[in-house]
Image (tube, helix red, strand yellow):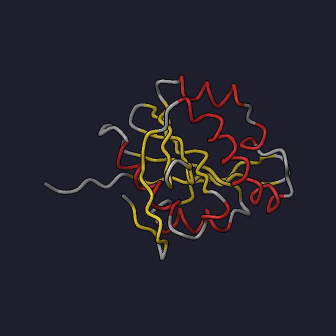
Amino acid sequence: MVGQLGNPRPVTPEQLPETAAGELLTLQRAAFLAEARAHHDLDLPPLLETLEQVRAVFADPAVTVWGLRDGSRIVAAVRLRVHGDAAQIGRLAVAPDRQCEGLGTALLLAAEAAAPAAVRTFRLTTGEFSAGPLRLYARNGYRETHRTPEGVHELVHLEKVRVRARS
């Protein structure tokens, strides 16, 4: 269980099943609304994704969906897509009423720890105006590699080399 910054309610990280697709989509839409406002763009991919597309993610053997639950409620989620020795982290979402409790950090670290041993590099993207996520990723060792245009803003590409514990 993960105890969070001043949060009396513990949460448990787990791999989410396909049956969680609807709840995951609801969480994702709620969490990404603030990002859409910051970027003046309501057409962000996490807001446009359909239930069928989310279900397809669960069917992809290269993807694992991780979540944190508070009781039966999913309060944070993230996707990990493995490509050889690299893993793409995506759709990190925390319920708006549970933000700033350390859940995003806890889930990010849990997903990294659960990645196959062959993974050497973690990659992710976020919007240039995503101040909170950019701080979160920097605190956890992610460094900007480049930017690409995405509609009316830029995507910031970040990368982190996996550090192995010495035996």
Outermost residue on the bottom side: it is 6
Q: Position of residue 3 (x, y in %)?
A: 40, 66
**Residue at (45%, 58%) from the top-left corner?**
11
Q: Position of residue 64 (x, y in %)?
A: 47, 35
**Quadrant of the frame with the C terminus:** bottom left
Quick one: 136 or 85, which is closer to the camera?
Answer: 136
Outermost residue on the left side: it is 167
**Residue at (52%, 45%) from the top-left corner?**
89
Q: Position of residue 86 (x, y in %)?
A: 43, 39
The answer to whether residue 56 is left or right of residue 118 is right
**Quadrant of the frame with the N terminus:** bottom left
Quick one: 143 or 66, which is closer to the camera?
Answer: 66
Outermost residue on the front side: it is 71
**Residue at (70%, 44%) from the top-left corner?**
26
The answer to whether residue 29 is left or right of residue 62 is right
Q: Is residue 27 above or below residue 80?
A: below
**Residue at (74%, 63%) from the top-left corner?**
129
Quick one: 67 or 89, which is closer to the camera?
Answer: 67
Q: Position of residue 100 (x, y in %)?
A: 58, 70
Q: Is residue 65 above or below residue 31?
A: above
The answer to whether residue 81 is left or right of residue 147 is left
